[in-house]
Image: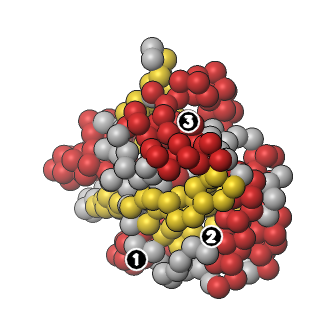
């Protein structure tokens, strides 16, 4: 069975890895004033756009999920011919319209694919599954990496589906925002309740950085540290602790809202990398998606993994 994999561009995985494994992309469009940018996971283009538009005005940005008619066209024009079963994994439905758009498109795809496949010489049925990753940014990377591993190992579509649904419930993302002034403005613009405006205001005055957490679609603060670099070091040490305790997949995803050299220079990164190497956990590192940087600010850090239940400490 030919199995296809689709993610949206908020998913923080390296573009080279996505290309190498033929993972298809649902791009997110970001608009700031009269300027728009289609996020195609081009790291250089993303950083250039951030420098030109996001730093000062990014908190006012509007993001547009890939519309259902475009998703339908992607499937009917390409995917129903190239594959027999497609997994489409999206950012948590609590944060974006992408999951709902993909679900809406899937009904039309399943009603209309048969003549297209028959014309291409395929007489077998086509199936697809829309999977809510229940995650954001680096946390989204766990499921597609596992889907590729299972596909390459020859796993069946039902087995892959079961595994992805299992991991979606057990995936975690942790994040340290760099600029709380930006985050405060963004929260106010969105009307977001994940981090209180008062906490962000006080934190900005004292240079206290919250450590934010996403699990099963819910987001909120789990800790606070004075200064960005100490907060990053604390997060890296915690991630290394989880690696040593045992992850549910041999995967750790990291994304950073800037050049990756800056990520590598953060205190605690080398110790985390060493722990991953020692325990045979593969690191996937990338520039944060434009969606991520618009929502949490440039220079922010996210870490994602799948693990048994735990508390941040």
Q: Is residue 130 visible?
A: yes
In percent of the image, x 79 and y 64: which residue is there?
A: 268
In percent of the image, x 74 and y 58: which residue is there?
A: 230
What secondary structure is found at the residue carrying circle 2? strand
- Kindly report which numbered mark, 2 or 3, lies closer to the viewer in this rendering: 3
Q: Position of residue 96 (x, y in %)?
A: 35, 46
Q: Position of residue 200 (x, y in %)?
A: 52, 46
Q: Earlier in the sequence, mark 3 or mark 1?
A: 1
Q: Earlier in the sequence, mark 2 or mark 1?
A: 1
Quickly name the residue at label 1: 166
The quarter of the image holding the N terminus is bottom left
The quarter of the image holding the C terminus is bottom right
The Cα atoms of the two marked residues, 2 and 3, are separated by 30 Å
Q: Position of residue 207 (x, y in %)?
A: 67, 47
Quickly name the residue at label 3: 182
Quickly name the residue at label 2: 251
In percent of the image, x 75 and y 53: which residue is there?
A: 229
Q: Position of residue 23 (x, y in %)?
A: 51, 52
The Cα atoms of the two marked residues, 2 and 1, are separated by 15 Å
Q: Is residue 139 visible?
A: no
Q: Nearer the viewer, residue 237 or 259?
A: 237
């Amino acid at each position: 069975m030919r199995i296809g994999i689709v993610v949206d561009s908020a998913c923080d995985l390296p573009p080279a890895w996505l290309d190498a494994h033929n993972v298809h992309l649902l791009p997110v469009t970001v608009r700031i004033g009269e300027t728009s940018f289609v996020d195609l996971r081009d790291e250089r283009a993303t950083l250039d756009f951030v420098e030109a538009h996001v730093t000062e005005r990014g908190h006012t940005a509007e993001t547009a999920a890939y519309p259902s008619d475009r998703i339908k066209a992607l499937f009917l024009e390409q995917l129903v011919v190239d594959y027999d079963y497609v997994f489409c994994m999206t950012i948590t439905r609590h944060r974006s319209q992408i999951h709902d758009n993909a679900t809406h498109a899937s009904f039309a795809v399943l009603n209309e694919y048969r003549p297209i496949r028959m014309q291409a010489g395929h007489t077998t049925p086509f199936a697809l599954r829309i999977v809510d990753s229940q995650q954001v940014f680096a946390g989204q990377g766990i499921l597609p990496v596992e889907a590729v591993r299972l596909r390459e190992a020859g796993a069946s579509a039902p087995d892959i589906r079961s595994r992805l649904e299992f991991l979606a419930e057990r995936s975690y993302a942790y994040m340290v925002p760099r600029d709380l002034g930006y985050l405060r403005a963004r929260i106010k613009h969105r009307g977001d309740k994940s981090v209180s405006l008062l906490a962000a205001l006080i934190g900005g005055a004292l240079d206290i950085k919250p450590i934010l957490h996403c699990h099963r679609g819910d987001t909120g603060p789990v800790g606070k540290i004075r200064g960005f670099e100490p907060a990053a070091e604390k997060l890296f040490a915690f991630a290394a602790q989880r690696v040593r305790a045992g992850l549910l997949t041999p995967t750790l995803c990291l994304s950073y809202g800037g050049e990756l050299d800056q990520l590598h220079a953060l205190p605690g990164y080398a110790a985390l990398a060493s722990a991953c190497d020692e325990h045979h956990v593969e690191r996937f590192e990338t520039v944060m998606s434009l969606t991520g940087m618009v929502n949490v600010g440039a220079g922010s850090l996210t870490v994602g993994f799948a693990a048994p239940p735990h508390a941040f400490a």
